[in-house]
Amino acid sequence: MSAHAPSGPAPQPDFHLPAPIRNAALACAVLGAAAFGYGVMSEAWRGWSNGLISAYYFVSIGVGAAFVLAVMHVTKAGWGIVVRRVPEALATWLPLGLVTLGAVTYFGMHHLYEWSNAETVAHDHLLQHKQPLLNPAAFFGGMVFMIGGWAALVFAMRRHSIAQDTDGDEKHTHANVRLGGIFLVFFGLTITFGALQWLMSTEPHWFSTMFGVYQFAGAHVAASAVIVLFTIGLQRGGFLPNVNDNHLHDLGKMMFAFSTFWAYIWVMQYLLIWYANIPEETGHYLARWEPDWVKLWGLNAVLNFVVPFFVLLPRPNKRNPKVLVPVACTIVVGHWLDIYLQVMPATAHLAHHGSPETVSHGPYLGVPELGAFLMVGGLFVVVVGSMLGRASLLPGRDPYLMESLAHDQ
Amino acid sequence: MHDAAPQAPRSFLVGVFDDEHAILAVTRAIAAAGLPIHDCFTPYAVHGLERAQGLPRSKLTFVCFGGGAIGFLTAVALQTYTQGIETSFLSGWPLNVGGKPFIPNTAFVPVCFELTVLFAGLSAAAGLLLFCGLLPGRQPKLLVDGVTDDKFAIALDTAAPGFDEAKARALMAAHHAVEVSYIAEAA
């Protein structure tokens, strides 16, 4: 809906990832890798668990951004043209996400997944029954197929989007509507298997039918938060002169809505298990209600739902970068905690299985946790930052550009 | 059914425009010139028009929030009462469901959520109708034909302080009004 009739976009400056930020990110990655290595050497299960948490964390942000991008294309979202290059760049993390997730799960497999141990499986009827899905070939084959498929579709959409900057042909818009549709269907099916194989199978005896949608909700809200952070950062630097409060308002609404959706799924997963009260299912929650973990379990809901919901409820807050940035940071931390709480209690139990006297009680928060996060996060910033610089930050010849410039609400 | 209005009908200077850019521009210009705007009439919601008119922030959000809060409390009260509270004049009906406590907070969550959403939504819809004066049986008269179709109109109350016909007509003409006329409010 155009309210003003702008004559055209403000001139778009070229963006290149500033050297200080790139160097700082690389330094984080190197230091993080050292800390990660130290973690693996000193306490292998803890090191690899953090590798899985961090690698999966950034894969989920990449694929969440890809989902946002695909939805924008499919719904022909006019408002979002001026910010579209941000999710487009975030989603290009996926190939390296495949490498990092593949590497940590390959080298840390026996510390992460009980089902990877042939001896254990030989004595466990349930794990034998689940072997068609939970075996290394299916695990890594599926990972390459799923993340590779997401990445291929993301790069196809990006190719069309950037080609349009030169030729201005509207066929690229139509092509991206089709590609976005294909992505959404493919993603809807694969995220369930991905979440199940990579995360849920750290507790191979446990099962939750909500787990796929639970991870989808987390990925979407975290990706929305990261999009907000990158958009506001670029805007502050003067690299997004066409983005104004109205666009931030929509991003804020997305964060608000999907934070609520995450909470809905979080509660519903719990409710189904609580109603039925079957030992195979309740074990998951009982482990997280140990006195050592329960505070973090509650904090998870505060960071991912209570804070974003009540802070973003009033309209002016959704338009104010000074409010959006802290809330987005809260969600970014909260999403990490969400994954941490899935993996850590499970792998700690696996590592200390059968020798309760050696159980060092959680929560585990320290150098290995920070190191693994910085290692992958540093690489993430470098890759996404340089991908942002590869193309103009404004899809200048998109047919919906004028609608986006005039966006008013 | 209505009695004839005792006071004389008010009279408005109404400018009619062909598109939303014109109505936005002229509304901003008239507000900037300090002329009293009675109201604008458009076939659909024109974004930014309420700010151009200088209308205060809608109170609908508070109605919606209040409705939601009442819905939440209703759900808590309903469930707590029916599940376990016994009073002297009415008794609840405690049920043993799967050995759960009689007042299981966990099971209350979906109902609280649904009633919050239901009450918030209904109160927002009711509040909208109320604020717009769209009560049952009311048949509002249109000042100008075509504002539900393809015309955009702005009305200035001729009796309001600060009304200046010459200035208003000049601004409307400058923004390509297709028609400017005096219209008396239908009784």
Image (tube, coloured by chain):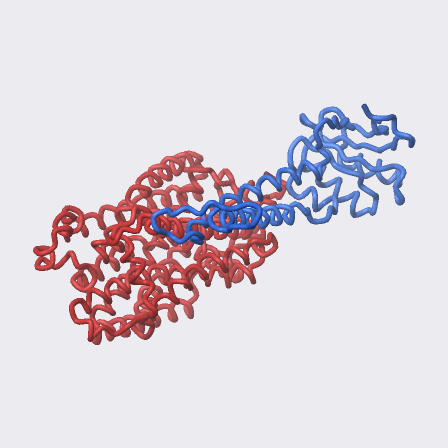
Q: Colour of chain A?
A: red
What is the count of numbered marks? Answer: 0
Taking depth in this image into account, of A356 and A134 the one nearest to the observer is A356
Residue A284 x %, y %: 28, 57
Give the position of the N terminus of chain B as an image quadrant: top right
Q: Residue at x 77, y 32 (%)?
A: B177
Taking depth in this image into account, of A323 and A9 the one nearest to the observer is A323
Indicate whether A200 appears above or below B1.
Answer: below
Quarter of the image holding residue A386? bottom left
Q: Residue furthest front?
A: B88
Quarter of the image holding residue B155? top right
Q: Residue at x 41, y 34 (%)?
A: A174
Left or right, A347 with reference to A227: left
Residue A34 x %, y %: 27, 74
Left or right, A388 with reference to A129: right
Taking depth in this image into account, of A392 and B83 the one nearest to the observer is B83
| Letter of the chain in blue | B
Residue B185 x %, y %: 84, 29
Residue B48 x %, y %: 66, 44
Indicate whether B183 appears above or below B80.
Answer: above
Q: Residue at x 62, y 41 (%)?
A: B123
Q: Residue at x 21, y 76 (%)?
A: A42
Left or right, A237 with reference to A296: right
Give the position of the C terminus of chain B as an image quadrant: top right
Q: Is residue B116 visible?
A: no
Left or right, A81 with reference to A107: right
Quarter of the image holding residue B182? top right
